[in-house]
Amino acid sequence: MVQLRACGIVVLDGRLLQQRKEHDSIWALPGGKLRDGEQAAAALMREFSEELGVMPVISRTVWIVENNFAHDGKFNHQVEFYFEATLDSRVMVGLDPSLMFQWISADDLADMDFRPSLLRDQFFSLPQGTVHLVIG
């Protein structure tokens, strides 16, 4: 089954906001799964509100990524919508105790288990327009 996700690319003062589950080693961009019938941008707004208590300003869709991977012994097939977004201030603590958030520099990102890894070098120089990528 294909999961649909919405992710926010938030860079503030040269640092990228990322998240991971408390007992996981993989870092990713903040966001989450779309609910049935939900638009991707609306899902991102909801996820930021639920997990961080803030509402991002979404400027545009940057990537649409099809991602196939195994994690914790389970195969995952996701289509992810990546939006460029801004926040008024640097969020430090989330509302969901099972999630960890941090702001990192491009140098920090190079040494982390970040997924999808193909995008690792792209966040600090975003392309113009929407790019469709298939990873897997």
Image (cartoon, rainbow, N blue to C red):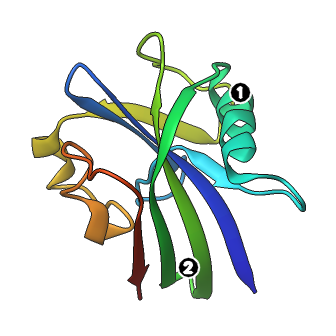
Q: Identify the residue under disc 1.
A: 49
Question: Which part of the image, by quadrant, shows the C terminus?
Answer: bottom left
Q: Is residue 83 left or right of residue 37?
A: left
Give the image quarter of residue 14: top left
Q: Position of residue 94 (x, y in %)?
A: 59, 26
129, above or below 2, in the image: above
Q: Residue at (48%, 84%) from the top-left corner?
A: 69
Residue at the extreme right of the image, as rendered: 36
Front: mark 2 or 1 = 1
Amino acid marked by disc 1: Ser
Give the image quarter of residue 51: top right
Residue at the extreme left of the image, as rendered: 107
Q: Position of residue 57 (x, y in %)?
A: 55, 25
Q: Residue 133, which numbered label?
A: none
Q: Does the residue at mark 2 contact the one at mark 1 (Cβ under 8 Å)?
A: no
Q: Is residue 104 left or right of residue 34?
A: left
Label 1 secondary element: helix
Amino acid marked by disc 2: Asp
Q: Identify the residue under disc 2.
A: 72
Q: Residue at (49%, 42%) from the top-left corner?
A: 60
